[in-house]
């Protein structure tokens, strides 16, 4: 039986993801994948065509606030209150660290952004109209 070496717990969430990658042969177009599992430290992406090892990637995915709190991302209580009921965009970067027959593992770096996906408010809309 293998010993678990991950620092963060993985959760089996199937999340639609968009990814771009920087490989030795250049920049990839936007690719769409589904995660098999995810944590605050990385994700396993299901694919028949994994990117080369050590490819630098940028992932974006949309999740619910409940999924976000399940993943144990660190958020302020104010953010949790203000974002209730909203979908959340996460943008993360990392590298491909492993290939398996069903896909590839990506380790996130600590440079991720979390923001709510909310419509433009009246104040933002009127502010944009005044140049």
Image: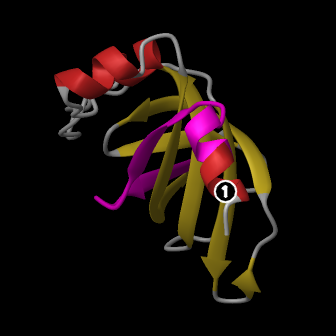
Q: Is residue 107 magenta?
A: yes
* 8 up-or-down from 66: above or below: below
In the image, taking residue 16 as reference, residue 48 lies left or right, namely right
Residue named by callout 1? 128
Q: Which residues are magenta?
A: 104-125
Quarter assignment of residue 66: top left
In the image, taking residue 87 as reference, residue 25 lies left or right, namely right
User: Mark 1: which secondary structure?
Assistant: helix
* 17 up-or-down from 68: above or below: below
Q: Is residue 123 magenta?
A: yes
Percent position of residue 118, x then y: 60, 30
Quarter assignment of residue 62: top right
Query: Is residue 44 something one can see in this rendering?
Result: yes
Percent position of residue 28, x then y: 76, 73
> Which sits in the foreground, 16 or 68?
68
The C terminus lies in quadrant: bottom right
The N terminus lies in quadrant: top left
Which residue is rendered at x = 32% and y = 39% of the image? 40
Which residue is rendered at x = 56% and y = 73% of the image? 55
In the image, taking residue 82 as reference, residue 85 lies left or right, namely right
Which residue is rendered at x = 50% and y = 10% of the image? 85
Colour scheme in use = secondary structure
Percent position of residue 13, x then y: 53, 20
> Which sits in the foreground, 109 or 7?
109
């Amino acid at each position: 039986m293998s010993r678990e070496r991950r620092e963060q717990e993985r959760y089996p969430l199937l999340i639609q993801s968009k990814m771009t990658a920087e490989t030795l042969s250049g920049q990839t177009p936007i690719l769409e994948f589904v995660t098999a599992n995810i944590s605050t430290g990385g994700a396993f992406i299901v694919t028949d065509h994994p990117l080369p090892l050590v490819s630098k990637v940028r992932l974006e995915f949309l999740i619910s606030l409940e999924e976000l709190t399940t993943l144990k991302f660190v958020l302020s209580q104010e953010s949790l209150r203000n974002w209730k009921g909203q979908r959340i965009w996460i943008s993360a970067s990392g590298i491909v660290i492993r290939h398996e027959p069903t896909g590839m593992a990506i380790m996130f770096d600590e440079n991720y952004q979390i923001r709510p996906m909310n419509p433009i408010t009246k104040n933002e809309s009127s502010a944009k109209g005044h140049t």
